[in-house]
Image (cartoon, rainbow, N blue to C red):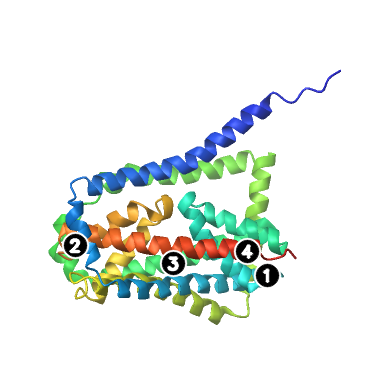
Amino acid sequence: MSNTPPAKEPSQKKKSLLSSALQIIVPLALGVVILYFLYRDTDFAGMWHIIKNANWGVLTFSLIFGLSGNVIRGLRWELLINPLGYYPKRRNLIYAVLGNYAVNFAIPRAGEVWRCGVIADKEKIPFTKLIGTLIIDRMFDTIMVASIIAVAFLCNVPLFLTKSSEFNLPPMLTSVWFYAGCVGIVVLVLIVMTIFKETSVIKKIRNFLTEMWNDMKKVWQMKQKKRFFIYTFSIWLSYFLYFYVTFFAFGFTQNLGLAAGLFVFAISSVSMAIPSNGGLGPWQAAVVFGLCAFFVDLPEAKAFATAVFAFQSIWVALCGLYGIIGLSLQKKK
């Protein structure tokens, strides 16, 4: 009797390939659509004239802060891993963080999974525990972004009062049904988790959440809390300077001031939550919107967003490539 392969295997491979293709195509298409509507009426010759007259020395100087922020992120990750009883090489963590952002240019959000996977392989640390540290990492990033938004709002209250009529919220956010739907989804998830709690899938989810919660408690008991918070603040200070220093490369932004820089940085940070290749599309749109709020002309705002995104993206890709090569040269534990 011949052993025939399962009929489902080719189908599963096709689904996997389709899923991978969608993860690449959909975010890229989203970015391209946003860029199309943003730049469709642009005078590219005029935009290039603005870009080529920028102070490229200042733009190059800004790159230092982007690299330093990612290096500090690697150091902070070490503080999250050590309380779990694992002590990976510091340089491997830094390499992985640098590579993370390069991978995100190819497949949005895949970089985070990649860096956990590569460290799990190199340092022999359980992948699920690294995912838990990543969730904590992102949780503190969310808190920092929310704090930056709050400070940016307080620093720009006069702007919001004078231009409040121009900031129209989407109808969805003002509808009671939107919030009722969000609550309904949460309730539905809790009901499913309760009714089907004995199924293997729900058990795995509950075990993962329980293990992650226990790891979070261990992390919170770390002896180096002060250093952790210093690192967190330093990461976002570096990211802010990475962006704000570029204001001084253009005549139309160099006098906008710190409050304006903080506001534009805040909304550009929020835009990165939209899954796209390295922020392609949403980031430029957010920056153009922010600059125009401070009365920068639209062509100049577009030129600024284009130059800064392109220049800094090349830098991120180069640093990421260096990190990936550095990791490939490291021996496994």
In this figure, what is the number of numbered marks? Answer: 4
The answer to which of marks 2 and 3 sits earlier in the sequence is 3
Contact, mark 1 vs mark 3 (Cβ under 8 Å) = no
Label 2 vs label 4: CA separation?
Answer: 43 Å
The answer to which of marks 4 and 3 sits earlier in the sequence is 3
Label 4 vs label 1: CA separation?
Answer: 12 Å
Label 2 vs label 3: CA separation?
Answer: 25 Å
The answer to which of marks 1 and 3 sits earlier in the sequence is 1
Nearest the camera: 297 or 82?
297
The answer to which of marks 4 and 1 sits earlier in the sequence is 1
Q: Residue at x 67, y 46 (%)?
A: 204
Dot 2 corresponds to which residue? Answer: 293
Nearest the camera: 60 or 241?
60
User: How many other residues sit within 10 Å of disc 2, few (<14), some (14-19) or many (≥20)?
Assistant: some
Quadrant where the N terminus sits is: top right
Image depth: mark 2 or mark 4 in front: 4
Disc 2, SS = helix
The answer to which of marks 2 and 4 sits earlier in the sequence is 2
Q: Residue at x 49, y 60 (%)?
A: 101
Residue 330's image quarter? bottom right
Residue 247's image quarter? bottom left
Label 1 vs label 3: CA separation?
Answer: 26 Å
Label 1 vs label 2: CA separation?
Answer: 46 Å
Dot 1 corresponds to which residue? Answer: 88
> Is residue 175 visible to us here?
no
Give the amino acid at mark 2: Ala
Dot 3 corresponds to which residue? Answer: 143
Give the amino acid at mark 4: Leu
